[in-house]
């Protein structure tokens, strides 16, 4: 929303960045200390940090003058000043919570600003600060090349930045920064929740009470589902309301082409053209997010199906898919490896008479172990080597020739294991993982679930350098 932003604008908003009258207001101070911090009268913790990186002192003063009364969500700006790429690198280390940077390209070298971007993104791993390149010499840093090769958020020529456009850029940068901070905080909270759930899972594994975990996940899925259903149910009428309101605005503008100075000023302030273009996209993104959470909730409910004292019909493909969705965060690409490919070869098989909750726990153990094996095999390989020979998990299901059994094979192309490890693999408390990363219970419990609870078999085939395959054979009927 734009009505949470207060700013004071002068009649020269559409002129070049700073007018002649304003130039006279700029202080004669030409010596500014390294890593200068200038607040607008409030504590830094109550202000947005904005960094100005330019070797021209007047650019610093002009920028501060243009944004001197700017506030966003009730908070002003604290200005950070650096006069070279080297100073900027030191400054961002001291102030990693900087919201956005106005960054000159040509300073002590022709690509000093681009080196700063690379340092922030690649060495400091700071993906949150918004970076706006501001250059007066575009020939040294062509826009297309810079946008393709560097993680920047906007590219402006200095002559483009009138006061109004500078304010618009500041609003966009602060909105983006605020949203990324919110996402980061939520991710940290989710990480803690997942950590707590993991610790709970270890305890439950030791006591072999997996039904308790299933009940816990069911409650979580239920709690997620209620508000998401509410949001999803209101999303369509919200889209319709917004569509109608935007259509009404267009009609007003056609009917009253000269609405008056006050309305024109309001239109400019809220950037109506951008709002009309971006608002439907925003609602569409919200809908996509709510659909995604609903899918996760459904998968959690599928994964945590409670087991009664009797076997029930179950579509094992749904169980496998719910497990993959829960483990999706471990399959995605990160700084250590590209995305782990999952190849699915599902056969035409009937529903199984089984205990779904227990069977899903087996799928979780086996697929998670396959991911662990791939991550271990990556330790001696570079990112490019992994990309050339990608990590892969293959999941195949088939029906036996007599149609009485289902075969489920989960295979990875990791390093495999020795004969000695294979012999101990299903042993109680046996693990090849580091302390704290494995309980040695997952595979032993999985074998008990398959063999004792379902009358099937769980076997392993592996060879060093050729990966590992775990195969499950389960009767289609209950056998009771």
Image (cartoon, rainbow, N blue to C red):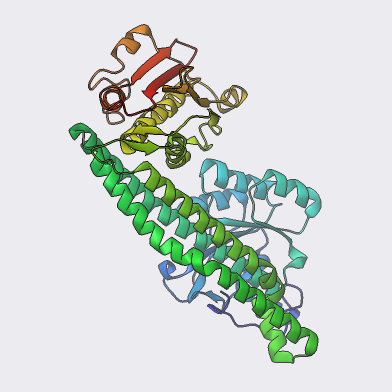
Coordinates of residue 7 in the picture (x, y in percent): 58, 80
Coordinates of residue 329 in the picture (x, y in percent): 46, 41
Can you see residue 99?
A: no
Asked whether 322 or 142 is in front, the reply is 322
* Residue 390, image quadrant: top right
Task: Judge from the rendering whether residue 177 lies leftward or rightward of residue 375; answer left or right.
Answer: right
Can you see residue 16?
A: yes
Task: Judge from the rendering whether residue 225 lies leftward or rightward of residue 389; answer left or right.
Answer: left
Coordinates of residue 286 in the picture (x, y in percent): 54, 61
Task: Judge from the rendering whether residue 86 lies leftward or rightward of residue 146; answer left or right.
Answer: left
- Above or below residue 321? Residue 398 is above
State the quadrant of the C terminus.
Answer: top left
* Residue 52, image quadrant: bottom right
- The residue positioned 47% from the left and 69% from the top of the image is 47
Asked whether 274 or 428 is in front, the reply is 428
* Residue 453, image quadrant: top left
Coordinates of residue 242 in the picture (x, y in percent): 62, 74
Asked whether 151 or 323 is in front, the reply is 323
State the quadrant of the N terminus.
Answer: bottom right
- The residue positioned 35% from the left and 19% from the top of the image is 458
- The residue positioned 33% from the left and 12% from the top of the image is 421
């Amino acid at each position: 929303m734009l009505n949470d932003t207060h700013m004071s604008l002068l009649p020269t908003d559409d002129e070049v960045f700073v007018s002649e009258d304003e130039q006279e207001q700029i202080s004669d101070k030409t010596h500014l200390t390294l890593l200068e911090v200038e607040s607008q009268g409030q504590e830094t913790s109550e202000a947005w940090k904005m960094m100005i990186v330019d070797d021209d002192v007047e650019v610093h003063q002009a920028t501060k003058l243009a944004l001197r009364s700017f506030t966003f969500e009730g908070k002003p700006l604290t200005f950070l000043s650096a006069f070279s790429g080297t100073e900027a690198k030191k400054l961002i280390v001291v102030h990693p919570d900087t919201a956005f940077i106005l960054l000159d390209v040509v300073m002590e070298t022709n690509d000093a600003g681009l080196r700063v971007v690379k340092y922030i993104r690649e060495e400091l791993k700071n993906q949150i600060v918004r970076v706006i390149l501001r250059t007066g010499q575009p020939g040294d840093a062509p826009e297309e090349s810079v946008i393709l090769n560097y993680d920047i958020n906007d590219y402006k020529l200095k002559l483009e930045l009138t006061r109004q456009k500078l304010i618009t850029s500041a609003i966009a940068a602060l909105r983006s920064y605020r949203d990324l901070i919110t996402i980061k905080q939520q991710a940290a909270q989710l990480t803690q929740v997942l950590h707590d759930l993991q610790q709970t899972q270890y305890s439950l594994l030791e006591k072999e009470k997996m039904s308790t975990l299933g009940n816990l996940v069911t409650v979580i899925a239920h709690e997620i589902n209620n508000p998401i259903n509410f949001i999803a149910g209101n999303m369509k009428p919200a889209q319709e309301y917004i569509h109608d309101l935007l259509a009404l605005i267009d009609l007003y503008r056609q009917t009253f082409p000269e609405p008056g100075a006050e309305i024109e000023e309001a239109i400019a302030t809220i950037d109506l053209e951008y709002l009309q273009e971006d608002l439907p996209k925003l609602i569409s993104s919200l809908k996509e997010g709510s659909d995604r959470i609903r899918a996760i909730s459904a998968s959690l409910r599928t994964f945590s199906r409670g087991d009664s004292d009797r076997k029930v019909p179950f579509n094992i493909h749904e169980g496998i898919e719910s497990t993959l969705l829960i483990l999706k965060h471990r399959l995605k690409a990160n700084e250590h490896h590209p995305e782990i490919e999952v190849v699915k070869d599902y056969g035409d098989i009937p529903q199984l008479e089984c205990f779904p909750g227990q069977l899903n726990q087996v799928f979780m153990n086996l697929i998670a172990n396959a991911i662990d094996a791939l991550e271990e095999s990556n330790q001696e390989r570079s990112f490019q080597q992994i990309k050339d020979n990608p990590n892969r998990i293959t999941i195949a299901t088939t029906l036996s020739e007599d149609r009485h059994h289902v075969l489920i094979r989960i295979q990875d192309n990791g390093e495999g294991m020795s004969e000695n490890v294979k012999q101990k693999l299903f042993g109680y408390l046996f693990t090849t993982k580091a302390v704290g990363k494995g309980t040695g219970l997952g595979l032993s419990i999985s074998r008990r679930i398959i063999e004792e609870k379902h009358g099937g078999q769980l076997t392993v085939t592996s060879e060093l350098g050729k990966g590992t395959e775990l195969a499950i054979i389960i009767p289609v009927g209950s056998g009771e």
